[in-house]
Image (cartoon, helix red, strand yellow):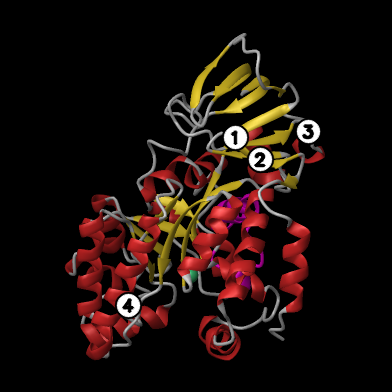
Amino acid sequence: MLLKNCRFIVTQNEKREILENRDILIEDKILEIGNNISKKDEVIDCSNKIVIPGLINCHTHIPMNLFRGVSDDKNLQRWLKEEIWPREAKLNEEMVYYGSLLAMGEMLLTGTTCFNDMYFFTENIAKAAKKAKMRCFLGCAMFDFFDSDKTDAEIEKEEKEINKILSLKNEKIKPSVTPHSSETCSDELLVKSSKLAEKYNLPIHIHLSETEKEVNECIKQRGKRPLSLFEDLGLLKNRFVGAHGIYLNEAEIEILNKKKGFIAYNPCSNAKLASGICSAKELKYLCIGTDSVASNNNLNLFEEMKFGVLLQRIKYNVDAMNAERIFDSATINGARALGIEKVVGSIESGKEADLVLIDKDNIFLNPNYNIISNLIYSFNGVVSDVLIGGEFVVRNRKILSFELEKILKKVNSFNFS
Ligand SMILES: [Zn+2]
């Protein structure tokens, strides 16, 4: 396939080049980017398109799309106990499958091609990802609540899920190791999680210092802060994605920066639950996530990026964060966090063609003095086309990989009121 005459290509390559009026030749991978490439087969006119790399959402709980709008005005502890856990107890495999497709539809229509998820019913999420043709990392949340009788069962369950996902032999769907947090996991469970990640060479994805209460409890019970605990127990030897990272002190930030530990910054969710503002400015290894729709209330990464910059300015000053840096966090740095920077995250020959096409004439993108500025601060996120692995999954704002109407009907038939 040839994407002919792309008006702008925001490559996110090392030099962060923005190319004008070039062609992109694609199989599943990007074969060539150049001028006047000739090809007789499928040629797509892109003279009115801005092409960007598919966005990467590094912290999600996607089936929770089913809980959109059920509770909007409580802090994390009350929200979980009073609103979320009782509803999660009602979930079944069918609900998770359809809720996941609802989330995937929303991600695709707003230019996200890859996500990093932690939830339950992982097999059903994988089934939905296969249907939607999305790229993802899936982990089944582990917790033993400090009950040593439960630790091994959690690890065994996780290993079983890992093997199930690996047995799909789907290059786009990968497992990850997901101990829930310092609040819910014993030392033994964290050590065994780390060994499991090492055994299969997988990323560790865990909640980290989302609230002050979490940090204080950790100090009280274990004599150290969550990140020091994770470091001591070996978690940072692996690819590490800590979600939130709001309450980190200077020493912890230094550890992350030294050990290449990534923080998935979740600005909307953190603001909505009044959890606080992450010190994203200080972090060398920054990716971005939405968290679940129940605390966001959407998966639109364009909105997340804008919030991400603005909150840093409230916390620090106007120089704290800019559009380029937050765009990196949703593209190439998201790929680095997950260890797939050789596969996706930028538009370069040899990488998979995970590409997002946006209409240059979109009202929010004009006049066009600075594309990145417009994409971060002004764009509403409604993209025109999405390719994953060189295949169209959205064409002219319509999802091709599944029937959205059917999913909407199904999810509206579930009752979580
Ligand atoms: Zn979360």
The answer to whether marks 2 and 1 mark residues whose Cβ atoms lie closer than 8 Å is yes
Give the residue type that dot 4 points to: Ser
* Stretch in magenta: 291-311
How many marks the image carries: the answer is 4
Residue 160 in the image: state x and y as whole percent. Answer: 32, 69
Mark 2 and mark 1 lie on one chain; the one further toward the N terminus is: 1
Indicate the secondary structure of the residue bearing disc 2. Answer: helix
Crowding at dot 1, Cα within 10 Å, few <14 / some 14-19 / many 20+, comes out as many
Q: Dot 3 corresponds to which residue?
A: 366
The residue pinned by badge 2 equals 375
Q: Can you give x and y, in whole percent of width and height, for residue 394 in the image? A: 69, 43
In front: label 2 or label 1: 1
Distance from the alpha carbon under mark 2 to that under mark 1? 10 Å
The first of marks 4 and 1 along the sequence is 1
Q: Report if the CB atoms under discs 2 and 3 are less than 8 Å apart.
A: no
Alpha carbon separation for disc pair 4 and 1: 37 Å
Task: Judge whether 283 appears above or below 87 on screen.
Answer: above
Regarding mark 4 in the picture, which secondary structure is present there? loop
Task: Please name whichever residue, 391 or 343, is drawn nearer the observer in this view of the structure.
Answer: 391
Is the CB of the residue bearing disc 1 within 8 angstroms of ligand 1? no
Residue at horizontal 58%, vertical 21%? 24
Cα–Cα gap, marks 4 and 2: 36 Å
Q: Which residue is mark 4?
A: 182
Residue 36 occupies which quadrant of the picture? Answer: top right
Q: Are marks 4 and 2 in contact (CB under 8 Å)?
A: no
Judge left or right: residue 129 versus residue 262: right
Q: Amino acid at mark 3?
A: Asn
